[in-house]
Image (cartoon, rainbow, N blue to C red):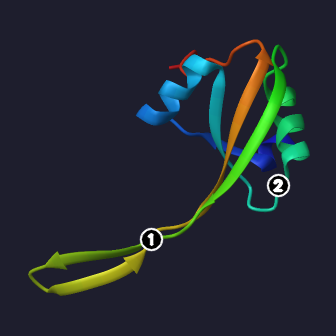
Amino acid sequence: MSQNILIRPVLTEKAAMLTEGNRYAFVVADGANKIQIRQAVEARYPDVTVADVSTMVVRAKNKRLMTRKGVFTGRSGGYKKAIVTLASGSIDFYENV
């Protein structure tokens, strides 16, 4: 169940600053709700307890690439992101690196 809902963690500078407040960001499945996200995080990381889940939809953006052959246009993909606040425990994304 948790493999289908949690796609990957978000590893950016802004997400790293959130970890100081015991908050973690994940890219989740488009159809996942907050209850499913909470259960998936607690199933994947058994020593944590989730206090709150916030979700947002990151919209796709139009991109343009200028080359010698001309202008190429396209779109980046949109996705759903979840910010998970933990009541207890912590998550280490870099333990298997």
Query: Where 39 falls versus 88 (above or below)?
Result: below
- Residue occupying the point 28% across, 77% down: 64
- Helix, strand or loop at label 1? It is loop
Circle 2 packing at 10 Å, graded few (<14), some (14-19), many (20+), is some
Instruction: Give how far across and how far down residue 74 sits, in percent.
Output: 39, 79
Task: Determine which of the numbered discs, if any, sits on residue 11 in the image.
Answer: none
- Residue occupying the point 46% across, 35% down: 14
Q: Is residue 88 left or right of residue 56?
A: right
Q: Quadrant of the N terminus?
A: top right
Q: Is residue 95 left or right of residue 17?
A: right
Disc 2 marks a residue whose amino acid type is Ala
Camera-nearest residue between 56 and 7: 56
Residue 96 seen in the figure: no
Instruction: Give how far across and how far down residue 35 sits, in percent.
Output: 91, 44
Instruction: Give how far across and how far down residue 25 sits, in percent.
Output: 62, 37
- Residue occupying the point 72% across, 34% down: 84
Query: Where 66 falls versus 5 (above or below)?
Result: below
Q: Is residue 39 left or right of residue 53?
A: right
- Helix, strand or loop at label 2? It is loop
Residue 36 seen in the figure: yes
Disc 1 marks a residue whose amino acid type is Lys
For mark 1, what is the residue? 61
* CA distance separating discs 2 and 1: 22 Å
Instruction: Give how far across and how far down residue 89 sits, in percent.
Output: 76, 12
For mark 2, what is the residue? 32
- Residue occupying the point 80% across, 33% down: 52
Q: Residue furthest bottom?
A: 70
